């Protein structure tokens, strides 16, 4: 019973030490410990109860010994406490009866300890519940019943011989003021597992008639409440079936009978148990395809072992029901039935729409890949021949004005080729087919070379390019071409959307989060709505036909796909008119020593 401090419950250990250890292990406060240590915690012939963290309860009776010590008797009362808790769940609907009957009702356990004390008993004996509950019931008895009562219970437990039956007999009670009064006492027993409870019904015989009228009134109210409760259940849209602790059906509403489509005579309360009920469900289950699991008769056994379950039942009429089982305190089971036919139909529609969208997306990617391959063949000829004409391989162009046209043809061809390459890369990325040729990359040199490529365009717009790269920067395990594509795409965007006189800063650093590359600008910025839209392919923040900034809308989505292919992340931080900062983070596992080169891996 004192298992938390079992190691120190040995002869020679002081009471103070034992209680201090118990307070420490059980997380009790100083006030609790002081209460335990004050006068040994208990006065002579008093009783206290304690609950331990593992949930078990112990009652302690203390008696003074002739030498000034104390005899302490410990009793495990966990079962009684658990029984009390299970009974509490029924108190709400029984309270109307308990509070209105004129008869006193007292419940005790097998140790004669009072468990409950209703208001009628309070009026009869003059005690408040807190003065009686937890104490021996013999405080309500005058002699000779006081001395003989514990013997009655002990004899009954040993032999089964009753002194007082359910019919009752006349005895005397002892009020708090010491007066005795005649009463009729009937005792019944209630077993819940190993817990035995005695229910005593006490009636003051001098007011028998009034008590009988009150009892009739209370029975009428009880029937009215029961009828009203049944009416409420019958008008619920969900079906409800209630089974007692012995698996017998005790309640079934009309919605359940209608949903299940079973003959009402077969499933009336008291004529069927949960096993037969589940067997009837299984026999009538008609799942539409593989989306609903076929019920089996052994489901009843599974529900007993694990009562909190959710499954589906499809009736022959095509109605699909979601069945939920819930356990009740003290045993028993509740099954609720909800018509989910419309929901299942919507789910199937959404599933079909999703499959159709995925098929369309695959067809789009296939089309883009095919058309891109087809366009590259004539583009190669356009770019190649225009480049030969630019360099006048076969002689000067005549007239000279053709040179500007040739430059435009070559530049347009290159632009179109870049767009086709981006579309191919985006299609591969969406299909998860981005190929990486990984090596140790010097990110600092890569950023500086990329800035040289961006410098001409930045200079034309009066934009300042700057870098924030530490002198010592480790190598990064990455695809160098793809990494350069990431930096150039983000850098080009920053330059394109920054007004004249602005600043674009490209930096790199290593933190505990990984290898971080940032591209920050003082450009036009974006709203939160724009930031979510620009990550979609072929979308730009400025969607007007007369938009100022050119582009296919593939730069950011493609860049994000390349970053994800490296196991990294890309985040945007932007405010309208304040500029944008793009942060690319590669995982720490890709960071290499600064003394590596491409040939080392």
Image (cartoon, rainbow, N blue to C red):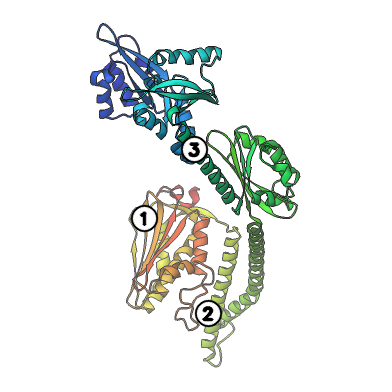
Q: Which residue is tagged 3? A: 213
Please, which residue is most extreme toward the bottom here?
399
Mark-to-mark CA distance, 3 and 1 = 89 Å
Question: In this rendering, which labeled residue sits more in front, label 3 or label 1?
Answer: 3
Mark-to-mark CA distance, 2 and 1 = 36 Å
Q: Nearer the viewer, residue 110 or 542?
A: 110
Q: Quadrant of the N terminus?
A: top left
Q: Nearer the viewer, residue 83 or 158?
A: 158
Mark-to-mark CA distance, 2 and 3 = 106 Å
Q: Which residue is tagged 2? A: 411
Q: Position of residue 157 (x, y in %)?
A: 52, 15
Please say whether residue 4 is visible from this viewpoint.
no
Question: In this rendering, which labeled residue sits more in front, label 2 or label 1?
Answer: 1
What residue is shown at x 46% (from left), y 35% (from top)? 210
Q: Position of residue 302 (x, y in %)?
A: 64, 36
Q: Earlier in the sequence, mark 2 or mark 3?
A: 3
Q: Which residue is tagged 1? A: 509
């Amino acid at each position: 019973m004192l298992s938390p401090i079992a190691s120190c419950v040995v002869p020679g250990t002081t009471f103070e030490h034992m209680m201090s250890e118990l307070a420490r292990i059980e997380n009790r406060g100083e006030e609790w410990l002081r209460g335990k240590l004050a006068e040994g915690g208990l006065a002579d012939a008093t009783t206290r109860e304690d609950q331990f963290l593992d949930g078990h309860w112990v009652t302690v009776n203390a008696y003074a010994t002739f030498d000034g010590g104390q005899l302490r008797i410990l009793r495990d009362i966990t079962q009684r406490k658990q029984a009390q808790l299970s009974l509490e769940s029924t108190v709400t609907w029984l309270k109307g009866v308990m509070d209105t009957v004129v008869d006193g009702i007292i419940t005790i356990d097998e140790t004669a300890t009072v468990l409950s004390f209703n208001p009628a008993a309070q009026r009869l004996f003059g005690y408040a519940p807190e003065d009686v509950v937890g104490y021996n019931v013999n405080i309500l008895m005058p002699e000779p019943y006081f001395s003989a009562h514990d013997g009655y219970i002990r004899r009954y437990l040993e032999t089964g011989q009753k002194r007082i039956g359910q019919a009752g007999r006349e005895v005397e009670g002892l009020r708090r003021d010491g007066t005795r009064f005649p009463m009729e006492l009937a005792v019944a027993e209630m077993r819940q597992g190993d817990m035995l409870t005695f229910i005593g019904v006490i009636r003051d015989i001098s007011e028998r008639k009034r008590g009988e009228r009150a009892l009739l009134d209370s029975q009428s109210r009880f029937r009215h409440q029961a009828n009203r409760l049944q009416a409420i259940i019958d008008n619920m849209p969900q079906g409800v079936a209630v089974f007692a602790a012995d698996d017998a059906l005790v309640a079934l509403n009309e919605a359940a009978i209608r949903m299940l489509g079973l003959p009402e005579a077969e499933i009336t309360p008291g004529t069927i148990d949960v096993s037969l009920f589940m067997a009837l469900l299984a026999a009538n289950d008609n799942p539409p395809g593989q989306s609903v699991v076929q019920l089996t008769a052994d489901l009843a056994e599974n529900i007993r072992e694990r009562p909190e379950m959710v499954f589906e039942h499809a009736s022959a009429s095509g109605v699909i029901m979601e069945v939920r089982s819930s356990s009740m305190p003290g045993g028993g089971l509740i099954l609720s039935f909800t018509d989910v036919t419309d929901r299942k139909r919507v789910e199937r529609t959404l599933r079909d729409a999703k499959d159709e969208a995925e098929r369309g997306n695959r067809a789009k990617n296939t089309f883009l890949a095919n058309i891109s391959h087809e366009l590259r063949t004539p583009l190669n000829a356009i770019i190649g021949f225009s480049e030969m004409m630019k360099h006048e391989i076969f002689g000067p162009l005549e007239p000279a004005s053709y040179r500007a046209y040739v430059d435009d043809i070559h530049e347009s061809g290159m632009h179109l080729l870049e767009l086709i390459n981006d579309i191919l890369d985006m299609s591969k990325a969406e299909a998860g087919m981005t190929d990486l040729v990984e090596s140790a990359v010097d990110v600092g040199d890569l950023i500086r070379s990329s800035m040289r490529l961006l410098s001409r365009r930045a200079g034309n717009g009066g934009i300042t390019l700057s870098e924030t790269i530490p002198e010592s920067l480790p190598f990064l395990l990455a695809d160098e071409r793809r990494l350069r594509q990431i930096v150039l795409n983000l850098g080009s965007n920053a330059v394109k959307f920054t007004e004249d006189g602005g600043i674009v800063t490209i930096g790199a650093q290593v933190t505990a989060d990984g290898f971080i590359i940032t591209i920050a600008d003082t450009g036009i910025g974006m709203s939160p709505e724009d930031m979510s839209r620009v990550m979609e392919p072929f979308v730009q923040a400025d969607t007007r036909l007369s938009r100022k900034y050119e582009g296919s809308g593939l730069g950011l989505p493609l860049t994000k796909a390349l970053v994800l292919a490296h196991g990294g992340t890309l985040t945007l931080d932007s405010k309208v008119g304040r500029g944008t900062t793009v942060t690319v983070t590669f995982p720490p596992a890709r960071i290499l020593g600064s003394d590596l080169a491409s040939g080392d891996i």
